Amino acid sequence: MHRLLDVLPAFTGDRRITTRFTLAPGSDFDIDALAALERADVRTLLWDEALRVKHDLILAASPKGALRLLPGPRVLLPHGAGFNKTVTNDGSTSIPSGLDPYYLMAEGEPLADLHALAHEEQVNRLARHSPVTACRSAVIGDPTLDRILVSVPHRAQYRAALGTGPRRLVVLASTWGPESLLSRRPELPADLSRTLPHDSFQVALVLHPNVYSSTGRFDLARWLDPALEAGLVLSRPYEEWATLMVAADAVVTDHGSTALYAAALGHPIINAYDGGVELIPDSPMARLLAATPRLPTPADLPDVLHTALTVDIRSHATAAFAEHGQALTLLRQHLYRLLRLRPPSGPLEARAFSPSSTTPRQPRAFTVRAEVSGESISVARFPVLTQEPVHHLAAEYPSAGPRAVQSAAVLWSPTGKQSFHRPHATVWTAAGWTAHVMEEAPRCRTAVAVLTRRRCLLRHRTAGLLSMHLEPHQQAGTVSYADPGAVASAVHAWLGGHPMPALPVSLLCDTGPVTVRVGLAPATSDDLDYEL
């Protein structure tokens, strides 16, 4: 269904064309397909009604089901990046899904009038399994890849929507079925989220649309809740997965072909496929996995990523995709030939994807590892349930919850003025809020009121009230800010060895990808009286 939505712009601007969608009966995934159609605001036909109408052209993303019963010329637009796997208990044994003559032939004749394929290699493989069908094929490229490529200039926008910042975005790509990453290694999303430092890495998960259809987002969110609570991004099945591919710094994949799109972008690929019978030997995906380093355990990811950065994997994508940027233009020529119409004049351009609307959860409590060396402090923050060795617990007050708040050594305030649009509100001053927090949470040693991204008021049980100034990190024309909560933990660790510091003092705080200068000075009246 999503493949069809990507190719319909081939008819852009032509009022002669009317589109209708119908679902062939018997699919295990029809509920989610209907939901996708409703979100796209398309018009649909009931299957029985579609059978009674002679169609000028039929577009399909799969030959399976009762497609052969629809009257009219048919075009097959295979979804995914090539033919890389078999589907257990479906069609002929060991034949790649999408190349099975059992589905491609109808009463001795080819089912489709056109097979629109992405690469000549796919035509050759089709010819080996169904020579008659291959005679009706054409290489047009991949319309989804074209959309991904024109979306590359929007990478910074996609990362901003995800809240990635200077962190490395690691995307897990899982296909569907018993050999998928999520079936074989269901704990990997949560384990990576717990093992990788929060301020250095962001983890996202891209699932095959069939997983959403068979499971449902509600149960997926319930199963993945520990990882989601730690900040995992769970993309929706249409368009959002592609923005994650563009935004990614690395992709951890099973044998699903999604990773070939990442390879076309030159992203490092890490192999998490545990083997089986589904992957077709010598397919583009098999060759890609053979060339990429494996991920034994979540803790190995930083080292494996370092190795993956040395592997040039673009060549494996060239074996799956041809005619970059031309898919809609070439496809339009073939479709209008079958329609026996003159196509509209003018070029066709692929449309960039919109930024993700998925807002990942932000952890409200962290266990923190801190190392102090003179005036330099490095901190690494992890979810509360991590197995990493840590120095202290830090939490946002009060949203982290009573258990974390009462156990934390460091508490920080939510950012942003909460009562700006409520004229009758009573608000805390920064000094009043930090005193209140210390009283409410006796175990708290450091309370930090976040005033702006550059200014905080810090109250320490021994050192007293301090103004904290955070300088941004500047590099190559960009400005990055450290999370004030991470800086609060760094200063807390430093104050542990300097309970009565000589002020002012300048500290260097390393939070992972961002190192910032932090100035500590006696609290100013402006900071003490700042209204939260």
Image: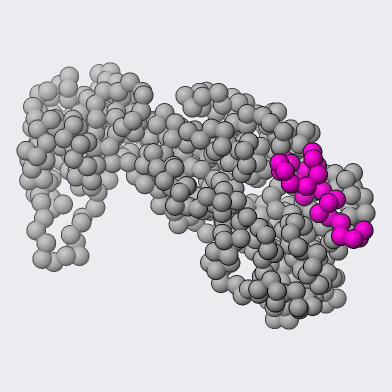
**Coloring basis for residues:** one colour
The residue shown at (52%, 50%) is 215
**Could you say where residue 501 lies in the image, as x and y percent from the top left?**
13, 24
**Could you say where residue 114 lies in the image, as x and y percent from the top left?**
84, 61
Q: Is residue 374 above or below residue 113?
A: above
State the image quarter where residue 115 is shown: bottom right
- Residues shaded magenta: 85-109
User: Seen in the image, is 222 located left or right of residue 483?
Assistant: right
Please state which of residues 103 and 482 is positioned toward the viewer in this rendering.
103
The residue shown at (59%, 48%) is 208
Q: Is residue 9 visible?
A: no
**Could you say where residue 137 lies in the image, as x and y percent from the top left?**
86, 56
Please state which of residues 138 and 86 is positioned toward the viewer in this rendering.
86
Whether residue 89 appears in magenta in the rendering, the answer is yes
Q: Is residue 364 visible?
A: yes
The residue shown at (69%, 64%) is 24
User: Seen in the image, is 239 located left or right of residue 367?
Assistant: right
User: Seen in the image, is 219 located left or right of residue 523?
Assistant: right
Q: Quadrant of the N terminus?
A: bottom right
Q: Is residue 409 above or below residue 48?
A: above
The residue shown at (61%, 44%) is 176
Q: Overall secondary structure of the magenta stretch?
A: loop
Whether residue 337 appears in magenta in the rendering, the answer is no
State the image quarter where residue 418 is shown: bottom left
Q: Is residue 54 above or below residue 90?
A: below
